[in-house]
């Protein structure tokens, strides 16, 4: 009996051979819920190549989380610059342009005077959550002070609004009280349906920063090779977010925001999936080896920068042979971007943008901010006549994303190859799937024989820090001598049910599969239980949803089933994943990384947003990857059977994809629920 079992069990990718765990948990473990204040550790990175690969994943995750993968086409800015005022050493003008059709981003442009026609370095200046927005001017922070100073030093500076601050608002908010900027700022895209599209306040602001950089780049007096960005608090978040995804920045200086603890408390700093695996430290490090200055304060969450965040980023810069391109400083103040902090930035940008080694010439001189009414772009609250409402903008963004996805699905093999190139990263980051390079197992019960078949219970996990998946493993006689041994991974959606009796003989579907010479691995309990409210406290920014956890578990089990390392036993090169109930939909999303899939679609109306907001099916951004049909398309031309689809389960693009690959015989779609015998015939048929 031992020899009969051990070959196939070793084929699960053993790491802990023969270790028996006598006790099984009574209930599945609940995931440890992370939030914006959960302390984070920087990962151990040993080589430049290792970091560059991770940095690429960070960039992709930022773009997917912000709804910017694939990157949208950029409409014309139609920029307007007017109201020029000249002062000693600089000028200031009003600016507005369309970051999206009908949505106007506004700000002020500061330029050097008396220094010729340029081209000059140019600096973006996103502001923090001051109630006055970009017009803030006090001892703790002044956007005007730094922009005036940059211009006097010979650089162009552009300060622009957060969404719903100052002059960047929707027509219906024109009469909102001036002291309510932060409240209306946090009201954008708060309907839960927007999460299905990865439409968020953070996504819009990241897009606005990209378009603001486009605006600077378009100015004839700007040196396009010397663009930079600096902002404080929420503006610091915008700074390192932009630096992570846009290589046009030649330098950046996020101020009082890069922390291993507090990650950002506003909607504009939290996007779905963004920090499940990454923290602000890593997102900021993604800009390496470009020059970067971290400015911290003893009186806020960046107080440990000299011992934690700074050294973590410094290690990455050193791996890239760019140690001189990172500096981190901390000053004894509260949360700020005051004169002391600003002068540290002047010195840094002077070095990298002006090539000025004399920091004494870059101190802040006395300045006079213009009155608010002079800097306001729309002081009367009247936007251009084609300005759109928030509802209109959100609807147009969904329409655009829908059309963008549909345009990717073409009728030929070359088009499908390009579709996969673009959409596979979107699938991976939307579902929060990291490819496990190693799975481990251990016995969770004794090896026994029943009804002529051999059985044991296994614990399967991705790493020591992950909870285990419990699975029953059944082996039919003769599996070791089979020319192409095959295994079926069975899963249902009732993970709260009692664990099966380890002494029971196989019955039902497992028995039917064993009688046909197939090994069977049934998922008895997933690695995590039911999560708390998935819509509260930025849950999806820091944690996987139930669906994401289930898809991840299924991929882990299937990888274990097919990874065989024991030369005495079979490698299950043919792995079929069979999902029942909602697990059929989870299996469909796992299909791109599995050999063959049977998916019970459970008559689910996947065209309904309400359906996709259900706890078992909720996944931020799922609409952006074509929902469940998109996952199936990425699996083409692998064998795929969808049944019980009902009438509201789109499959036209899926059929088109298989037809383009000449693989229509590998796809079967049936609206009704197929009987078990019909499904068994499909499973056992030879694979070509």
Image (cartoon, rainbow, N blue to C red):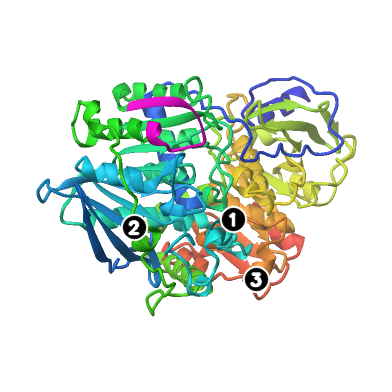
Find numbered disc 1 in the image and state the secondary structure of the residue it sits on: loop
Q: Which residue is mark 2?
A: 211
Ranked by sequence position, the earlier of labels 1 and 2 is 2
Q: In this picture, is 146 found above or below 459?
A: below
The image shows a total of numbered marks equal to: 3
Ranked by sequence position, the earlier of labels 2 and 3 is 2
Q: Residue at x 86, y 41 (%)?
A: 500
Q: In this picture, is 116 found above or below 94?
A: above
Q: In this picture, is 420 found above or below 38?
A: below
Q: Residue furthest left?
A: 116
Q: Which residue is mark 3?
A: 608
Q: Nearer the observer, disc 1 or disc 3?
A: 1
Depth check, front residue: 239 or 626: 239
* Structural distance between the alpha carbons of marks 1 and 2: 25 Å
Residue 671 shows in the view: yes
Residue 388's tag is none
The magenta-colored residue range is 326-341
Residue 69 shows in the view: no
How far from the left and from the top, in percent, is residue 287? Answer: 36, 37
Q: In this picture, is 549 found above or below 95?
A: above
Q: Which residue is mark 1?
A: 620
Residue count near mark 3 (Cα–Cα under 10 Å), binned few <14, some 14–19, many ≥20: few
Ranked by sequence position, the earlier of labels 1 and 3 is 3
Depth check, front residue: 591 or 85: 85
Depth check, front residue: 646 or 66: 66
Depth check, front residue: 478 or 606: 606
How far from the left and from the top, in percent, is residue 273? Answer: 56, 47
Say whether residue 597 is magenta.
no
């Amino acid at each position: 009996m031992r020899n009969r079992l051990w070959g196939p069990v070793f084929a699960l990718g053993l790491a802990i051979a023969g270790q028996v765990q006598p006790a099984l948990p009574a209930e599945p473990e609940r995931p440890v819920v992370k939030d914006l204040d959960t302390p984070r550790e920087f990962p151990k990175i040993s080589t430049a190549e290792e970091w560059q690969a991770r940095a690429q994943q960070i960039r992709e995750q930022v773009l997917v989380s912000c709804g910017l993968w694939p990157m949208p086409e950029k409409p014309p800015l139609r920029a307007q610059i007017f109201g020029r005022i000249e002062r000693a050493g600089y000028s200031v003008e009003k600016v507005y342009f369309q970051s999206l059709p009908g949505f106007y981003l506004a700000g002020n442009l500061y330029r050097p005077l008396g220094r010729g026609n340029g081209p000059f370095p140019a600096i973006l200046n996103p502001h923090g959550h001051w109630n006055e927005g970009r017009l803030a001017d006090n001892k703790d922070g002044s956007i005007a002070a730094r922009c005036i100073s940059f211009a006097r030093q010979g650089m162009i500076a552009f300060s622009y609004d957060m969404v719903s601050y100052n002059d960047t608002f929707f027509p219906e908010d024109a009469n909102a009280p001036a002291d309510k900027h932060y409240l209306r700022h946090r009201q954008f895209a708060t309907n839960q349906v927007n999460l299905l599209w990865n439409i968020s306040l953070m996504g819009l602001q990241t897009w606005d920063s990209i378009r603001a950089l486009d605006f600077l780049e378009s100015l004839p007096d700007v040196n396009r090779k010397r663009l930079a960005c600096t902002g404080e608090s929420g503006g610091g978040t915008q700074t390192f977010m932009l630096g992570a995804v846009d290589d046009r920045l030649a330098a950046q200086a996020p101020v009082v925001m890069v922390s291993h603890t507090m990650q950002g408390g506003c909607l504009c700093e939290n996007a779905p999936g963004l920090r499940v695996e990454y923290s602000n430290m890593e997102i900021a490090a993604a800009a390496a080896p470009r020059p970067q200055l971290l400015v911290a304060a003893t009186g806020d969450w960046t107080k440990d920068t000299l011992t934690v965040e700074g050294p973590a980023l410094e290690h990455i810069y050193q791996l890239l042979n760019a140690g001189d391109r990172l500096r981190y400083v901390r000053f004894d103040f509260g949360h700020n971007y005051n004169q002391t902090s600003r002068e540290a930035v002047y010195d840094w940008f002077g070095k990298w943008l002006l090539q000025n080694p004399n920091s004494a010439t870059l101190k802040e001189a006395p300045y006079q901010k213009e009155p608010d009414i002079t800097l306001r772009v729309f002081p009367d609250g009247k936007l251009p006549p084609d300005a759109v409402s928030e509802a209109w903008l959100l609807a147009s963004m969904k329409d655009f994303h829908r059309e963008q996805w549909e345009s990717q699905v073409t009728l030929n093999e070359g088009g499908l190859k390009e579709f996969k190139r673009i959409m596979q990263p979107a699938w991976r980051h939307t579902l929060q799937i990291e490819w496990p390079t190693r799975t481990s197992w251990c016995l969770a019960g004794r090896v026994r024989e029943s009804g002529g078949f051999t059985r044991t219970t296994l614990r399967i996990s991705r790493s020591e820090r992950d909870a285990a998946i419990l699975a029953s493993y059944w082996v039919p006689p003769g599996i070791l001598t089979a020319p192409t041994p095959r295994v079926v991974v069975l899963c249902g959606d009732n993970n709260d049910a009692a664990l099966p009796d380890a002494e029971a003989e196989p019955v039902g579907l497992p028995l039917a599969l064993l009688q046909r010479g197939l090994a069977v691995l049934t998922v008895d309990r997933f690695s995590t239980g039911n999560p708390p409210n998935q819509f509260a406290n930025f849950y999806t920014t820091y944690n996987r949803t139930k669906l994401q956890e289930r898809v991840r578990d299924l991929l882990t089990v299937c990888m274990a089933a097919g990874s065989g390392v024991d030369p005495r036993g079979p490698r299950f090169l043919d792995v079929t994943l069979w999902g029942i109930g909602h697990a059929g939909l989870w299996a469909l999303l796992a299909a791109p990384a599995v050999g063959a899939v049977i998916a019970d679609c459970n008559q689910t109306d996947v065209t309904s947003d309400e359906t996709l907001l259900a706890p078992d099916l909720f996944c931020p951004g799922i609409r952006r990857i074509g929902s469940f049909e998109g996952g199936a398309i990425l699996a083409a031309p692998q064998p795929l059977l969808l049944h019980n689809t009902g009438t509201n389960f789109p499959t036209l693009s899926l059929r088109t994809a298989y037809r383009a690959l000449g693989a229509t015989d590998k796809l079967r779609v049936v609206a009704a629920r197929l009987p078990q015998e019909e499904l068994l015939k499909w499973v056992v048929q030879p694979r070509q």
